[in-house]
Image (spheres, helix red, strand yellow):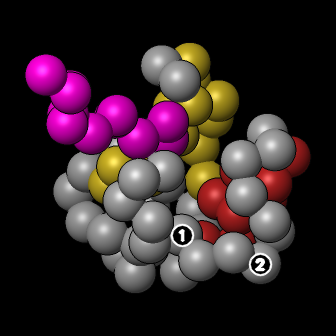
Amino acid sequence: MEDKTRDRPRVVVDEPLDGRRRIMIDGKDVGVVVSADELRGVLSRAGLMAADAPIDNPRLIEWHGGGPDDWPAV
C-alpha cells in the first residue's frame, strides 16, 4: 500500500509577535522577519526558492497565526 501522507512543509512561519514572525527551516530556528520580502530573502539564501517567488506554497511553508498577507509590522 502506497503512503499518501503529505510531507510536512520545510518552513514554518510562526504567528506575529511584536510585528515579527519567527522562521524555522527543517526544525531549526533561523531568525525573525518583519515582511514578505525579508522572508523571501531568507528562503532564497537557504536555496529553497527564488527571491521573487510567491510565499503562499503550502507544500513549502506552513503559516501559524495568519497567512502570507499578515504582516502587522508593515
Q: Is residue 10 magenta?
A: yes
Please identify the residue farthest to the right as the structure is shown.
45
Q: Position of residue 28 (x, y in %)?
A: 56, 18
Label 1 secondary element = loop
Reading the image, the residue beneath label 2 is 52
Secondary structure character of the magenta stretch overall = loop
Q: Position of residue 44 (x, y in %)?
A: 80, 54
Q: Residue at x 26, y 50 (%)?
A: 64
Q: Is residue 1 left or right of residue 45?
A: left
Q: Is residue 23 left or right of residue 2?
A: right
Quadrant of the image for the N terminus?
top left
The one of 48 and 73 positioned closer to us in this rendering: 48
The one of 21 and 50 positioned closer to us in this rendering: 50
Q: Amino acid at mark 2?
A: Asp
Reading the image, the residue beneath label 1 is 55
Q: Is residue 60 left or right of residue 35?
A: left
Q: Is residue 1 above or below residue 7?
A: above
User: Is residue 17 visible from the viewing direction of this image?
Assistant: no
